[in-house]
Amino acid sequence: MGRVLPFLYAAAPLVGALITLMNGVNSRLSNRVGYLVAALVIHLVGLAAVSLVLLVRPEEKRPGRLPAYYYLGGFVGVGTVFASSYAFSALGASLAVAIALLGQTIFSITVDATGFLGRKKFPLGLRGLPGVALAIAGVAIMAENWRTDVPAMLAALAGGVLPGLSFILNSELGRAKGIFRSTRVNFIAGLATTLVLVAALRPPLAVALPAIAEAGPVLATGGALMGVAMTASMNFIFPRIPAFSATLLLFSGQALTGVLVDYASAGALDARKLVGTLVLLAGLAINALISNRKKTAPPREP
């Protein structure tokens, strides 16, 4: 396990980078065909892809039963999409992302402190507060302006909390049932939820089908394939490192990739996002150093 941990800490930011790229592809698809139709396409393609993986690389069925709520990661994921979409449209990207990150931070600290859903406890001591303060400061720096819109701010907080909950549910299911089997369950639950919404809201599917064809194979399948890779990776990483560290590492990859994408599209760096990311990373470094000192410190003599 000691050899695996450095790999996990290095891999988490790469998964964060993948999330940014996936969100970009899914956003472009949604703009072409609408959010509900895009969600339907993403879950259909993702389910087909992970089912193909399981045909090529079957996972052994593991005995034992889990509580039903462990199978709801995909349902929670659909909630994340709609909460984030509403927050982005009402607050703007910078403020919505900042509040979501605040929600992620608070949720992950709570999970580590309480051992939520049977996870290993990683209590945050007083010495870890400076790192947390820096992380929150980094979030605040990222927001261009703060304005009061309570429903949208609550949606943005939900857009931060729900992914963390989804990661926990999926990763615990992955530990019990297998990484790709749990990923398939995630897409089945997400697809079932999306189908209920489609049946209730009845989007114009006949009009959307030509738009999907016009979007091309990269937009139609790219986000779903990246979603399979992201979910499977998090099913492996999340149970093995503290939730707070996983959250900050994921965000570092997301934010740095976002800065690079903005630079590639606009030809200029977003200084505010870059500074906020660096401040947040400083908070992560402080917490990592404190955690390492706790592990290497000799036990006190009675």
Image (spheres, grey):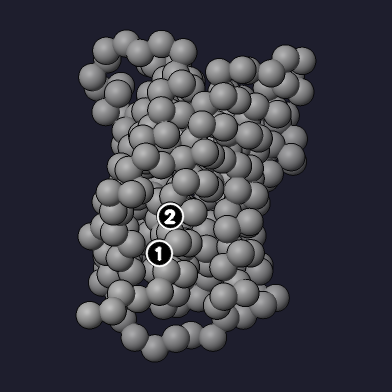
Please state the horizontal and vertical placement of residue 232, each as a whole percent of the image.
56, 62
- Amino acid type, mark 2: Ile
Vertical side of 227 occupied by 133: above or below: above
Residue drawn at point x = 62 percent, y = 80 percent: 58
Q: From mark 2 to mark 1, how far is it between C-alphas?
A: 6 Å
Residue indicated by mark 2: 290
Where, quadrant-wise, is the N terminus in this rendering?
A: bottom right
Is residue 54 visible to us here?
A: no
Please state the horizontal and vertical placement of residue 51, each as a whole percent of the image.
60, 67
Residue indicated by mark 1: 294
Vertical side of 261 occupied by 18: above or below: below
Element type where label 2 sits in the image: helix
Image quadrant in which you'd find residue 199: top left
* Tag 2 near tag 1, CB within 8 Å: yes
Residue drawn at point x = 65 percent, y = 27 percent: 259
Image quadrant in which you'd find residue 278: top right
Image quadrant in which you'd find residue 66: bottom left
- Amino acid type, mark 1: Lys
Is 114 left or right of 229, judged from the image as shown?
left
In this orientation, which residue lies closer to the viewer: 48 or 222? 222
> How many badges with numbers are in the image?
2
Vertical side of 58 occupied by 40: above or below: above
Mark 1 closeness class: few <14, some 14–19, many ≥20 residues within 10 Å? few
In this orientation, which residue lies closer to the viewer: 221 or 195? 221
Please state the horizontal and vertical placement of residue 186, each as a whole percent of the image.
45, 59
Is 140 left or right of 58, judged from the image as shown?
left
Please state the horizontal and vertical placement of residue 105, each as a whole percent of the image.
36, 42
Element type where label 1 sits in the image: helix
Residue drawn at point x = 56 percent, y = 24 percent: 275
Mark 2 closeness class: few <14, some 14–19, many ≥20 residues within 10 Å? some
